[in-house]
Image (tube, rainbow, N blue to C red):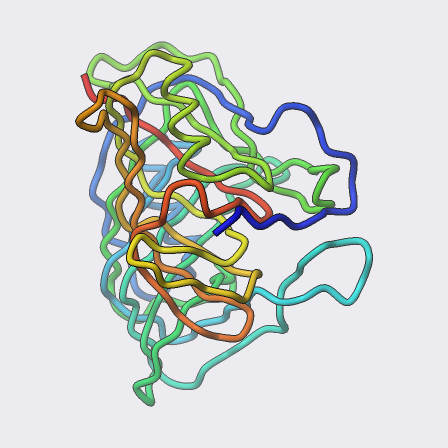
Amino acid sequence: MNLRFVEHPGAVPEARATRADGWLETARLELEPGLTLLDALALGLEKHNARSATLSLQGGAFGKLAYVMPATSSSPDHAVYFSGRYDPPGTVRLHEGCVTYGIRDDGPWLHCHASWTTADGKPGCGHILPNESLIAEAIQADAWLMRGVEFKVTPDTETNFSLFQPFSRPVVRPPDARPAFALRLAPNQDLCAALEAECESRGIREAVLCAGVGSLVGAVFDDGRVVEPHITEVYIRHGRIAEDEDGRLKAEIDIRMVDHTGQISEGRLRRGSNAVLVTFELLIEPVA
């Protein structure tokens, strides 16, 4: 299947990726009940002196969950947009999700895509509103703490959204920190190919993806399944770039996603068939 594209309202910059080099450290957090997702993460990461991080969430529950879904746009200002807000009643049990945590207007902000089960047993997936969603049972979080680099929300002229972009931040390298780089991928490029090219250009022969949040133009999976609806929200469940038997770099990326019709899908992406829709935010750790 050929790569599908979506035309955005702004001019297309020549650079299709923004990157910044730094280091990472890891930590395990328990997000406290009684706080919003944003406040709980801000509190936990402040204890580790982390202004930016990527995180993988597991378990726990929300007493109040607020979220939006991917949706068509009613305005020429955007190619795609968000749905109205959803507030499912009762306790919502979190399955898993990924977070990009960084800075907006000099304060903490985050971008979270996740999956859950509502009180009436229905599966859900979407874009959590972090300052409106209240934790009821502790959520576990594996955190990759960014050092010397951070994500900041800045205007993006191509898509007309304000999006996380990586920036360098001069710091002294912590003694146990490991090399890593933050990456934002722009629309209409294959996710796997872009990651392979990025590693190839740096001489990296093996790397792991430390979570990842973004969107794709539908999806084509390795097993032949196709997600035709083209507006999606995605998070990376597992990702790795390594040499195949012929010595070429190959990205293996397992995702979960929801499209604008409400269909939830998961699987391994087929290389060369999955274009970024609006953005993809990633932290990548080379494997020595």
Residue 74 placement: quadrant: bottom right
Instruction: Give the x, y percent position of residue 170.
Output: 47, 12
User: Horizontally, is 179 left or right of 52 in the view?
Assistant: left
Q: Residue at x 23, y 64 (%)?
A: 59
Q: Residue at x 51, y 33 (%)?
A: 184
Instruction: Give the x, y percent position of residue 265.
Output: 37, 66
Image quadrant containing the C terminus: top left
In the rendered image of this protein, does residue 255 appear above or below residue 227?
A: above
Judging depth in this view, the residue of 31 and 124 nearest the camera is: 124
Q: Residue at x 26, y 46 (%)?
A: 238
Q: Residue furthest bottom?
A: 120
Judging depth in this view, the residue of 43 and 257 nearest the camera is: 257
Instruction: Give the x, y percent position of residue 69.
Output: 54, 68
Q: Residue at x 30, y 64 (%)?
A: 33
Q: Residue furthest right?
A: 76
In the rendered image of this protein, does residue 7 appear above or below residue 248?
A: below
In the rendered image of this protein, does residue 90 appear above or below residue 253?
A: below
Residue 272 placement: quadrant: top left
